[in-house]
Amino acid sequence: MGLSMATAARWVERWECQQQRYAIDRQERCTVIADVVEHMTAGHPRPLVVDVGCGPGALAALLADRLPEAEILAVDADPLLLELGRTHYGSAIHYVETVIGEPDWLRALALHRPLDAAVSTTALHYLCEHTLRRVYRQLAALLRPGGVLVNGDHLCQDAAMISEIAAVVGRRRAERQRAFAHEDWDSWWSAAAADQELADLLAERRSRRLPSSKENDLTLSEHVALLQEAGFAHVGPVWQFGNSQVLVAVR
């Protein structure tokens, strides 16, 4: 049985709500990422953009809305989240299932020209340092000169005291926005498991070799160093609230 648009809409909305618990000012952060991509692709007809670790694809959908002539690839390993996004957001985005960082993960993208931009939000921290180093190098090689990588994630400061203060600032902001009133990750998945319309997709998900979470705890400066090592000429943060940051790297 196919997934209905109403069901997809309901679960995508719940996904976006629970993600607000984990990404301070999530909507603003995504808007900033879109601002950067729009600026860096100005004058380039039909820019090619990949969203790495897209989940259901809210950021990809925002980019498709902002850049209607762009070709948007939304990439993730989770078939359930991909199908929710595919059903909810429609044909403006091309969804690709692949395990990011695996040796052959880029083959699934079937790229036919250089990337203009690569983006990610609340995803790359799941990659261990060794894998992240490889992914940064691969994306740098795929981007055209002047192309951009934009990563929105929790990137701690190098000084422990400053990082601690930033975390407090972020938590207070989330409390003011009532972000912690939303369900958490485990509650979302438990509720999804009880929805019979998702049963086939959940079974498909269980059959996949999904990546295990080996979260890195790299600081902002360590991310900058890895990106420079990968071949990016200009690297730095352009937005921050607490430890939630948008890091930009220009090829």
Image (cartoon, rainbow, N blue to C red):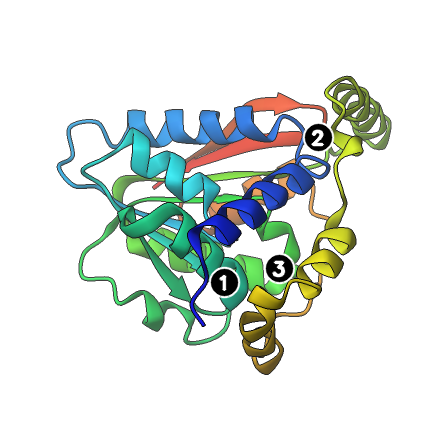
Q: Is residue 211 left or right of residue 57?
A: right
Residue at image position (77%, 17%) is: 176
Residue at image position (33%, 72%) is: 107
Distance from disc 1 to disc 3, alpha carbons, whole Å, reads: 10 Å
Q: Earlier in the sequence, mark 2 or mark 1?
A: 1
The vertical placement of 78 against 156, above or below, is: below
Say which residue label 2 marks: 243
Residue 215 seen in the figure: no
Say which residue label 3 marks: 127
Q: Quadrant of residue 198?
A: bottom right
In the structure shown, which secondary structural element does the residue marked by tag 1 occupy?
Answer: helix
Relative image position of residue 237 (x, y in whole percent): 54, 28
Residue at image position (13%, 37%) is: 45
In the structure shown, which secondary structural element does the residue marked by tag 3 occupy?
Answer: loop
Q: Earlier in the sequence, mark 1 or mark 3?
A: 3
Q: Which mark is residue 72?
A: none
Instruction: Say what amino acid the circle numbered 1 marks.
Output: Arg
In the structure shown, which secondary structural element does the residue marked by tag 2 occupy?
Answer: loop
Residue at image position (72%, 20%) is: 177
Q: Is residue 210 left or right of residue 250?
A: right
Q: Nearer the viewer, residue 85 or 42?
A: 85
Relative image position of residue 71 (x, y in whole percent): 23, 47
Please identify the quadrant where the N terminus is shown: bottom left
Q: Nearer the viewer, residue 30 or 101?
A: 30
Instruction: Say what amino acid the circle numbered 3 marks.
Output: Leu
Say which residue label 1 marks: 134
Please identify the quadrant where the C terminus is shown: top left
Instruction: Say what amino acid the circle numbered 2 marks.
Output: Asn
Q: Earlier in the sequence, mark 2 or mark 3?
A: 3
Q: Nearer the viewer, mark 1 or mark 3?
A: 3
